[in-house]
Amino acid sequence: MLRSSLLFVSFLLVSCSPGDRSDAESELDSRIIRIENGLISSLQIKGQPQEYFNLDERLEELGIPGLSVAFSSNGEVEWAQAYGMADKSENKPMTTGSYLLAGSISKPVAAIRSLQLVEDEVFTLDEDVNHYLTSWQVPNNEFTTTENVTLRRILSHTAGLTVWGFPGYDKGDEVPSVVDVLDGKGNTDPVRVFRQPGEAWQYSGGGYTIMQLAIEDTEDLGFAQSMKENVLDRMRMPGSTYENPLPVALHGIAATGYRANGDEVEGKWPIYPEMAAAGLWTTPSELIQYGIEIQRILQSGQDGVLSYKTVSEMLDAESDTHGLGPSVQDHTFGHGGADEGFRAQLFAWKDQPYAVVVMVNSDNGKIIRELLLSVANEYGLPGIEPVVREIIELEQESLNKFVGQYELEQVGVFDISVDGNRLKLSGVVFDYTDWLYPQSDQVFFGSETGSLFTFDVQDGVPVGFESQGGRAVRLGDSFPAN
């Protein structure tokens, strides 16, 4: 079994005798072994037995090269583990010090700098963000006549902005400037206001790229340097970086990203000029410091990298389950991440002194939720539970009605076809494919996470669907023939 471990139990060294330390370390080892053998599917089907997985075997089964995880307790990393390979062709094992891309977990970490500038009265949360932009302006249109794009709305994804995510650039590509990215001169559409700001939630990495530019336009430092000095170093993340391309000095400890089919990402990893949205390089043991610091401020009431007042506002969900940076649930706060060849997840508990980070170097992140469920079960932590769904049988004729093309707002076009007793959903997002099982004659759920797809049926014909806050419309030429 390829495994590298790093156990942080410094609190025991102060309070326990040598014999006690051995007992405590033995109990911790036993915990980790139970977690490694207690992975369960994040999607449970009624009537089917519970299945448990071994972590190493599950990595091999899912074709995921490597995984790194850290768990904290009472403000310190209690344990960290790494499994599998950081680079298969070089036979380089994953270690707890291997650098990985955090994907969209970059956003809540980057949000801290903008909130610091609010505390310093450089920014305000509710002013038109164009007041802070000097090198570029958010183009005004019919949607901004009465409402503005503000920092609060950018942070909570309610600014009505386009471009939900970024695919990154390969080594050797001409990497555009941030201004060029915002004007659609890179590999994504221009970032524009497509609905009235404040009207509804719509995830937008484009919004965080505007925030990045506002920080750069306001400060003498570049964004990566500002994040290092003002946020990363202050949160015990000195090795982490937003620099893109990744500095050559770090190439030797960076994990290679892999596609779901096992192929290497071109050039081993992507480059993200959209640093605030997707560009953070880190390790679980450093990334978890974000959860530890925000948790400490929240639970102690004492200021830190941000004030207690700001953290309280940050964790107050503005729309759906999103605060000013992190996603927010009843018991936890955190964020997920998806870059080309990398997936990650961070959870920290609001009322308990625990946090966990899991990162993999693959487009296939299915194991992340399975491991998180095992950790939550071992420690008895609320807020991470499997999704439970029930499958019903539908006649072939009923399934055929859903066949066609659907355009998901601000994401792209998806094809739906019939595959046995289920629907196959395929599209352009990360070569996305999922299978949809019927829960009712109008509601289906995805096979990966159990996400619901609720179809709008008019006069017996599906005309669109809603899923995870997004709305898809069936394209006119894909309706069934009469």
Image (cartoon, helix red, strand yellow):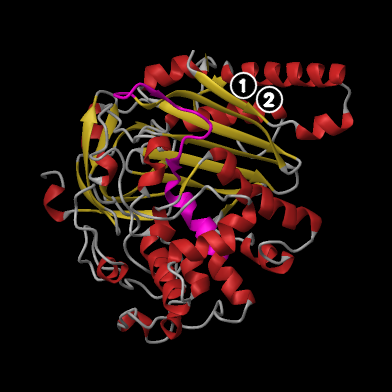
Q: Residues within 10 Å of mark 1 (few under 14, many from 20)?
A: many
Report if residue 101 lies within the magenta region: yes
Mark 1 or mark 2: whose residue is earlier in sequence? 1
Which numbered disc covers residue 461?
none
Amino acid type shown at disc 1: Ile
Q: Residue 430 appears at what percent x and percent y?
A: 28, 42
* Residue name at image x 31 percent, y 41 percent: 269
Residue at 64% of width from left, 62% of height from top? 316
Q: Residues within 10 Å of mark 2 (few under 14, many from 20)?
A: some
Q: Is residue 143 visible?
A: yes
In the image, which disc is placed on residue 378?
Answer: 2
Please give the residue where the numbered disc 1 appears in the rendered image.
35
Image position, residue 470 (x, y; %)? 37, 54
Q: Nearer the viewer, residue 9 or 324?
A: 9
Left or right of 121? Residue 414 is: left
* Tag 1 and tag 2, C-beta contact below 8 Å: yes
Tell me what residue is drawn at x 38 percent, y 39 percent: 342
Q: Secondary structure at mark 1?
A: helix
CA–CA distance in space, label 1 to label 2? 7 Å
Q: Nearer the viewer, residue 323 or 43?
A: 323
Q: Nearer the viewer, residue 452 or 268?
A: 268
Number of dots carrying numbers: 2
| Image x and y of residue 303, in percent | 74, 64
Q: Amino acid at mark 2?
A: Glu
Answer with left or right where residue 343 lies relative to residue 54.
left
Q: Residue at x 26, y 27 (%)?
A: 261
Magenta region: 88-112
Instruction: Please identify the quadrant where the C terminus is shown.
Output: top left
